[in-house]
Amino acid sequence: MTAAFASDDALRPGEVAVELPAAPDAGLYFIGAIRTPWRTRAECPKRGSADGPVCRLEIDPRFAQALAGVAEHPRLQVLYWMHQARRDLVLQTPHRTGITTGTFALRSPVRPNPIASSIAEVVGVEGNAVLVRGLDCLDGTPLLDLKPDRRTD
Ligand SMILES: C[S@@+](CC[C@H](N)C(=O)[O-])C[C@H]1O[C@@H](n2cnc3c(N)ncnc32)[C@H](O)[C@@H]1O
């Protein structure tokens, strides 16, 4: 095990953890942070909804020019980094189902690369911030990327 995890991340029946590689294969840049109303994982919705609360995607000023044109899109694919998730489980037993399942068959935040994605409704752009509905993450979750949702443009 290469990382320390919170005690509430104890293994459930059927779950299997593996040794993670000694070093990552690539690096990434957080482009900002997501401001949401949720302070604990238990408070977060399991998936975002178009009638959920407005959340703020606060973009690092260094990358702010990359927002040009974003307001023209009704929906964005938002990619974010589930920074509080353990990364070493290959089999998981979600509390909701109790069925042990492979990590790659789940949308759990617990995965080798804890990348989450949601399609969010764009409410507006205010300076360096994009206001959206449809997220499901903790306040302060690092933001990885934004892309227009081409499925419905
Ligand atoms: C099931 S995931 C779905 C994420 C995304 N919509 C997806 O499908 O990729 C959402 C859950 O992740 C957990 N979560 C939210 N923010 C997190 C964070 N920053 N670190 C770890 N877990 C988080 C919460 O329990 C939340 O209900």
Image (cartoon, rainbow, N blue to C red):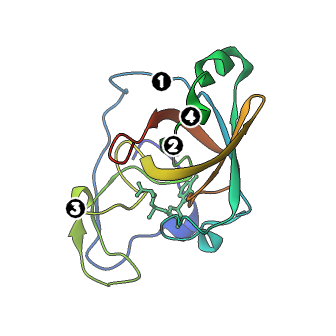
The reply to whether the residue tagged 2 has its Cβ within 8 angstroms of ligand 1 is yes
In space, the residues marked 1 and 3 are separated at their CA atoms by 24 Å
Which SS class for mark 2? Answer: strand
Label 2 Cα neighbours within 10 Å, binned few <14 / some 14-19 / many ≥20: many
Q: Nearer the viewer, mark 4 or mark 1?
A: 4
Specify which label sits upstream in the sequence, 3 or 4: 4
Return the residue nearer the eye: 80 or 126: 126
Identify which residue is drawn at 60% across, 66% down. 41
Labels 3 & 4 near each other (Cβ < 8 A): no
| Looking at the image, residue 121 lies above or below residue 48 | above
Which residue is label 2 attached to? Answer: 80
Three-letter residue code for mark 2: Tyr
Mark on residue 72?
Answer: 4
Mark on residue 105?
Answer: 3
In space, the residues marked 3 and 4 are separated at their CA atoms by 34 Å
Three-letter residue code for mark 3: Ala
Image quadrant of residue 103?
bottom left
103 with respect to 118 (left or right): left
Identify which residue is drawn at 24% across, 75% down. 100
| Looking at the image, residue 60 lies above or below residue 3 | above
Three-letter residue code for mark 1: Leu
In space, the residues marked 4 and 1 are separated at their CA atoms by 27 Å
Specify which label sits upstream in the sequence, 1 or 2: 1
Which SS class for mark 3? Answer: helix
Which SS class for mark 1? Answer: loop
Identify which residue is drawn at 78% across, 29% down. 127
Mark on residue 11?
Answer: none
Mark on residue 28?
Answer: 1
Q: Which residue lies furthest to the right in this view?
A: 127
